[in-house]
Amino acid sequence: MNRLLVGSLSGILIASSTAIANPVHAMAFRQISASMSQGIGGSAVPTLDVSPTWGLTLSFIKTGELIQQVRVGDPSRVVVDFDSPLAPVGQSGNAPTSQGRTTSGATIVYLRQLSEPLDLGLRLPKDARNTRQVPLTVVTVDRANQRKLYQFRLLLGSKTDYSTVEVVPDAQLPQRQPLKLLPVSNSSRTSGASKPLPSTSTAASGDLAQRFEQALAQAQAQQLVVPNTPLAARLQGMLKLLKQGATLDAAAQQVKVPMQVVNQILN
């Protein structure tokens, strides 16, 4: 039988469920930097897609940290489970015990969207109930007994090609060569500037702009996009168009950024 622990507005909903702990048909991995997830350097809060079919596995294995606490903004819609019991406060990640054994604890968070919200009597505001976005906060502890705060934005009901997200130290992320942009003639730079851009729905355009903004911040953190370059300026212009409701293709075409470059940033 599942065990539910219900907290306050931002409390935890924990369910012991083998169905959640063992997601079927694991899909592709996605990696995000630890610094970005902690908001270091003013990074945007990462958005994590939670597929209604696959759910989401969030791993802190590569950081070497143990999970002490997890809170979701709306526990009536998201079930949370772990690979092991949460680490107690005061316990350091992977610290040796007096008997020489290694201290263990949770390093993986399993997330699953419920088909219908539970009636937990939370009395959430209307805006909180009518959004697909749910905040997620994770508190971990490292080997030096330093606590770290990670923040994410869950996007519920999203079709995605990944089911696992790894939080990875920046030094372990693959180093990629900075993207370069071929010179564009003045005539092609201004062509089509007055044409109306195809747009998407308000909700869809907001999700798209948010994803692109996070991917762009990640690309800048990895030096894939160098600040104060023509490419960086055009990508900021593209982000502005996306926030105004333009489609990805139309915004890229408007600022003269090849889709190959856009796909490299998003992937």
Image: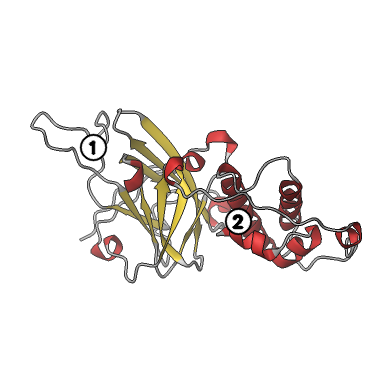
Residue at disc 1, secondary structure: loop
Q: Give how far across and how far down residue 250 sits, in percent.
A: 76, 66
Instruction: Report crowding for label 1: few under 14, some 14 to 19, many 20 or more residues within 10 A (C-alpha).
Output: some
Between disc 2 and disc 1, the foreground one is: 2
Depth order, front residue of 152/7 = 152
- Label located before the other in sequence (2 or 1): 1
Give the left or right position of residue 23, taking residue 225 as reference: left
Report how far apart the C-alphas of labels 2 and 1 lie in the structure.
34 Å
Q: Is residue 151 above or below residue 252?
A: above
Q: Residue under label 1, please give it.
A: 94
Q: Using the image, determine if residue 8 lies above or below residue 265.
A: above
> x, y (%) of residue 11?
38, 44
Q: Residue at x 87, y 58 (%)?
A: 185
Q: Is residue 238 left or right of residue 64?
A: right
Q: Residues within 10 Å of mark 2 (few under 14, many from 20)?
A: some
**Residue at image x 60%, y 48%?**
224
Q: Quadrant of residue 81?
A: bottom left
Q: Is residue 70 left or right of residue 256?
A: left
Decide if residue 256 is in sight here. Answer: yes
- View extreme (left): residue: 99
Tag on residue 240? Answer: none
The way the protein has been coloured in the rendering is: secondary structure
Q: Quadrant of residue 50?
A: bottom left
Q: Are marks 2 and 1 in contact (CB under 8 Å)?
A: no
Find residue 40 and report its horizontal and vertical position in percent. 53, 35
- Amino acid type indicated by mark 1: Asn
Q: Position of residue 103 (x, y in %)?
A: 18, 37
Q: Amino acid at mark 2?
A: Ile
Q: Which mark is residue 265?
A: 2
Placement of the C terminus among the 4 image quadrants: bottom right
Residue 222 higher or lower than 96, as above or below:
below
